Image: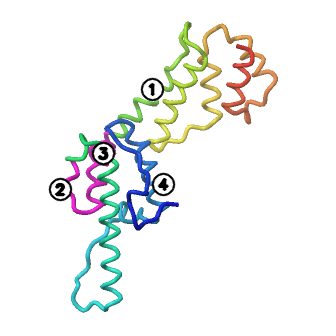
């Protein structure tokens, strides 16, 4: 495990402007693993220094240093094109909030994006010339994006979608799967394995 004494030892993913939700999940996990997430999520406000005991002053110094460390990690985890957006921020939470607002968007923007992804999921069909692996990857990408917006997509629903949206050459295999397998417990990997075996 990386030491907190040297932030260069903490390996961070670099955000270049794409796939913010995936980057955000990775960063959150990394900060939690180093017990630094509260500086990003809740922030740290410097209390009044008057009437502080020596122990409180030591704790204050430690918290200011950790907040600066988290801010430094955030600054190092964005590309040179993104960095200017957070150069004026003095706390980790302020920098994080700037990135959230710009790249994640408001709740209204997220609702519109989620609705668009739902529509993509519903209307996605395998093209006649498309390979099974390519279609699976395309559908999985949509499902993962929906999940990053906080909407659960059940395994059962994805299995149903796969079986309903394959091109006609898979009709016989789909019938066999539906007749011989328990559709309530059938997983995506099981379906894809069976389809690939017959492909």
Magenta stretch, residue numbers? 85-109
Q: Secondary structure at mark 1?
A: helix
Q: Secondary structure at mark 2?
A: loop
Mark 2 or mark 3, which is nearer to you? 2
- Name the residue beneath numbered marker 4: 29
Measured as percent of width and height from the top left, residue 139 is found at: 53, 26
| Precedes in sequence: disc 1 or disc 2 | 2
Q: Count residues near mark 4 (Cα–Cα under 10 Å), then give few for <14, some for 14-19, many for 20+.
A: some
Q: Main secondary structure of the magenta part?
A: helix
- Establish if 98 lies above or below 39: above
- Establish if 145 lies above or below 13: above
Q: CA distance from mark 4 to mark 2?
A: 25 Å
| Precedes in sequence: disc 2 or disc 3 | 2
Q: What label sits on residue 106 in the rendered view?
A: 3
Q: CA distance from mark 2 to mark 3?
A: 22 Å
* Image position of 170 (left or right of 5): right
Residue 142 belongs to magenta span: no
- Given residues 36 and 171, the one toward you in this image is 36
Q: Count residues near mark 2 (Cα–Cα under 10 Å), then give few for <14, some for 14-19, many for 20+.
A: few
- Name the residue beneath numbered marker 1: 119
Q: CA distance from mark 1 to mark 2?
A: 39 Å
Colour scheme in the image?
rainbow
């Amino acid at each position: 495990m990386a030491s907190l004494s040297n932030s260069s030892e903490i390996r961070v993913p670099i955000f270049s402007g794409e796939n913010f939700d995936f980057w955000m999940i990775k960063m959150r996990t990394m900060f939690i693993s180093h017990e630094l997430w509260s500086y990003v999520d809740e922030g740290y406000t410097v209390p009044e220094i008057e009437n502080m005991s020596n122990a409180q002053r030591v704790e204050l110094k430690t918290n200011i240093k950790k907040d600066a460390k988290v801010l430094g990690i955030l600054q190092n985890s964005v590309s040179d094109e993104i960095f200017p957006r957070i150069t004026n921020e003095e706390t980790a939470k302020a920098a994080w909030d700037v990135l959230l607002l710009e790249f994640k968007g408001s709740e209204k923007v997220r609702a519109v994006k989620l609705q668009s992804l739902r529509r993509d999921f519903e209307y996605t069909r395998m093209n006649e010339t498309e390979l099974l692996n390519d279609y699976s990857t395309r559908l999985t990408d949509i499902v993962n994006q929906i999940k990053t917006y906080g909407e659960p997509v059940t395994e059962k629903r994805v299995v149903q979608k796969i079986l309903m949206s394959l091109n006609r050459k898979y009709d016989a295999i789909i019938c066999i799967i539906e007749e011989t397998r328990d559709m309530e417990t059938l997983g995506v990997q099981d379906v894809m394995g069976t389809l690939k075996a017959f492909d």
